[in-house]
Amino acid sequence: MAVHFVAETADVPEGGHMVVQVEGREIGIYRINGEYYALNNYCPHQGAPMCAGYVSGTNLPSEVYEYEYARKGEIIRCPWHGWEFDIKTGKSLFSDRVRVKTYEVRIEDGRIGVVFGR
Ligand code: FES
């Protein structure tokens, strides 16, 4: 297991993200409600640069004609074909079996570390 420190916490504004390079991989670092998440910049469908996707929320399951918009800032939509994923877990919104790779994040002394390994 290796921790790669890639940025300072102040480099990623609340609700924003930055893309970093770590050992040949591109990883998006997202900040949501003060927490940091690391998402591979690669869509599992056809390889689009996931982190170029629009970040939004989603409508929760509901009754007909009822709409409950929630999870604002936690959902990313792939820029090529619109598949949607949970930034926090990498899971797609349509299947537990389709996901973007995520990485554990460690914060130490104001630095953001991405954990590889295991
Ligand atoms: S490449 Fe991402 S949905 Fe197709």
Image (cartoon, rainbow, N blue to C red):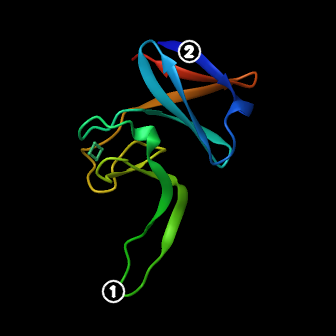
Residue 38, position as x, y percentages in the image: 50, 33
Residue 1 is labelled as: none
Quadrant hosting residue 101: top left
Residue 82, position as x, y percentages in the image: 33, 54
Number of numbered discs overlaid on the protein picture: 2
Name the residue at 24% across, 44% down: 97
Q: Which residue is mark 2?
A: 4
Name the residue at 44% across, 24% down: 26
Residue 64 is labelled as: 1
Residue type at numbered disc 2? His
Q: Residues within 10 Å of mark 2 (few under 14, many from 20)?
A: some
Residue type at numbered disc 1? Val
Residue 35, position as x, y percentages in the image: 63, 41
Judge whether 98 appears above or below 95 on screen: above
Q: Secondary structure at mark 2?
A: strand
> On the rendering, which quadrant does ligand 1 occupy?
top left
Q: Secondary structure at mark 1?
A: loop
